[in-house]
Amino acid sequence: MSSEPDCTDGSCSSTAPVAESVSPSSGILASYRIEGMDCAEEVAILKDALSPIVEVEGLTFDVLNARMNLRVPAQPEAVIAAVAATGMRAEPWEEKPSGQASGGFGRRDMLVAVSILCTVAGFALHAVSEGPSAAIGSEGAGLAEVVPWSVRGVYGIAIVAGLWIVAPKAWYSLRNLRPDMNLLMTIAVMGAIGIGEWFEAATVSALFALSLALEAWSVGRARRAVEALMSLAPDTVRVRDTNGHDREVDPATVAVGTTIIVRPGERIGLDGKVSDGRTEVDQAPITGESMPVDKEPGDEVFAGTINGSGAIEVVSTKPVGETTLARIVRQVADSQANRAESEQFVEKFARIYTPAILALAIVVAVVPPLLGGAWSDWTYRALVLLVIGCPCALVISTPVAIVASLAASARNGVLLKGGRVAELPATLVVVAVDKTGTLTEGRPRVVEVVPLGEHDERELLARAAALERLSTHPIASAILAEAESLGVKAAPAADVVAVHGKGVEGRIDDQAFWLGSHRWLEERGQETPEIHDRLEAMSSAGCSVVVVGNETHVCGLIAVADAVRPESVAAVKALRAAGVERIVMLTGDNKATAEAVGREVGVDEVLAELLPEHKVAAVERLEREFGPTAMIGDGVNDAPALARATLGIAMGAAGTDAAIETADVALMSDDLSKLAWLIEHSRATMSIIRSNTVLALGIKAVFVVLTFGGWASLWGAVAADMGASLIVVANALRLVRR
């Protein structure tokens, strides 16, 4: 067979276009769809073939989508020709419409069908003419003269069809002295023909071709799991024209700032903000939240989520290619470039293992006959060893498990940045958690109002609200929100002056009032022992307390606190149940407040009043003293610690481009309990990878023993190898359903 590029469709023309990446910001200059790239062995072959024209560091591969990306410039015709020389085929990448998954009966399937049918036909023809025992032959019997030429012709068609895709790869492997599974199988088939085992040769060709087709189908199954994410977005969105008529258009044609109409029960087509209407939205496809979330004007919604019972109008904020859903899908695909340690180990192992199997087969074929054994007998055993030694099941088992793990995580609202990240949660010993916005809601609210003297609660809130009416401070916002919720009306105070670091002063009904801290109360000389004790008790409970007074007395106290999230206590318990040995809270807040929150949620250690660099030092100490440490936070000030930790986790990343792009793990919702799920999911992933490795190697070990004992056959060996491949892939795909 020729290994020259197949140019019948014009794909080798120098005018062939280079597909632009869907993510220009990623640095990808061109992408190609690679026909025949289904596992890491083919990736290694492509790297070697392209190294003369492209720096290997400039190549990334997405086996799941059969995609090769170039981050450095290269001539398209040179790339296509270099890939064709390996027996694979490259064509410029073209995005397929949502939901249009690759599939159908292709050239490979036709060749497999021909190979299997001709093998069966050859066996039947030989059995009719010579009898079943003659058709099957006997191990090493040298039956070339027994097989009629007509039968050889049918078997020959089966062999050629089975090796049509394999042989070019085998030739490339031999030419470059890089033995791979294609070369092992081709040698086995040629050897079987050489010793007259035509039925065995045809059977090996057909079954190996079938195993490769099934392998491609299995990878396609994982591919479709990821494609299902993108198909969550509808193919059309409804916009209203200037005449007030609604029409459905392609989301790709909708400009940012366009108002789209979403009816009850429909999927939302683009990221945006609600401009009119109220509803509840099922955000599970993006955030993994189990309950619908109420939406009203000003709230953010995401493409792919499901509208509830109310009709809403949404102003789009992102183009279709930059929605949160599109970024998730792109990150799942790109994450395969960041390969897991187990994937790297298997690939390195295969590089040594395959040549070793070839060398061992040569020894088996040569040494025993030199010591008196039968050449045909030991040659046959050597061929069986080549077949069972094929590393296909071993090579594919780990990548499919990692991809399935990434897809399952994305469907549960947990975005992982690569195969390496999929393994790390299983190793965690310590979890360091930011307080504000992670364990707590991140929004202060009034938790206690204490009027003093003859004042009542509404009067005290009215005075505080009047003084804080024009302030944007979080505590002022909490006081104003509490006053509004109770229906307390308050006009802004007059002559309001902010006293730096202390509070504010102003006039209400022509009388001077002030609002400020405990320290300012002391400085004003208006504190009594009773008020002091009450302030200390409220502060030790984790509250920030503001004092309201006038020139003669203290009117009352208002306690404001950042409330603990309802799920935080359960999330901490779940982390312990998942095997995390130590949970530490890191915060820049004051010690009393931090310790109160720490007691409420049940963490082991509280480190308060920390600057960003102190959080980094704390993470370093925890790793040094205890082991692998995760840092979870939601703020810019957490970024250095997130980067330093074994695993950095961004909280509530839905709609936050920076978090999706930079974090190791992005929890798309504000649900801390997802971390415990991730740890258990990571352990399940590692368990499947280990069991797949043991199974793949175990089956081979059994057949090696059978081979040396003379009890194994060529067709049995290839059937066992194919079975092992299917078992490990099916085992890995269980992760998709978690």
Image (cartoon, rainbow, N blue to C red):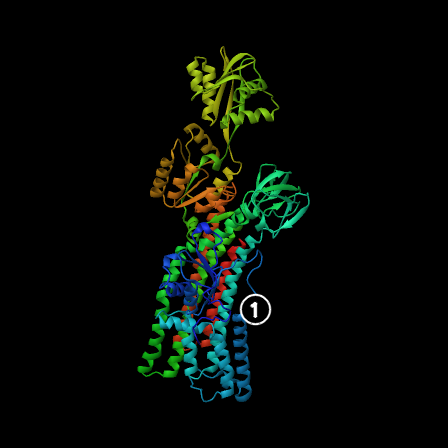
Q: Position of residue 664 (x, y in %)?
A: 43, 47
User: In the image, residue 228 lies at what x, y percent?
Assistant: 56, 55
Q: Point out residue 136 in the picture as x, y percentages from the top left corner.
A: 49, 82
Question: From what the image shows, is residue 248 above or below residue 614?
Answer: below
| Residue 171 spot, x, y in % from top left | 40, 73
How many numbered marks appear? 1
- Residue with the most extreme front position: 15
Q: Is residue 412 above or below residue 178?
A: above
Identify the residue shown where x is 36% and y is 38%.
Answer: 618
Mark 1: few/some/many CA within 10 Å (<14, 14-19, 20+): few
Near-viewer residue (412 or 91): 91
Q: Is residue 300 left or right of residue 139?
A: right
Q: Nearer the viewer, residue 32 or 220?
A: 32
Left or right relative to 686: residue 228: right
Q: Residue furthest top?
A: 552
Q: Is residue 691 visible?
A: no
Q: Is residue 735 visible?
A: yes
- Label 1: element kind: loop
Left or right relative to 473: residue 373: left
In the image, 568 versus 410, the foreground residue is: 410
- Snapshot quadrant of residue 282: top right
Residue 300, above or below 189: above
Which quadrant is home to the N terminus? bottom left
Point 36% across, 43% down: residue: 623
- Amino acid on which disc 1 is placed: Phe
Residue that mark 1 sits on = 105
Vertical side of 440 occupied by 414: above or below: below
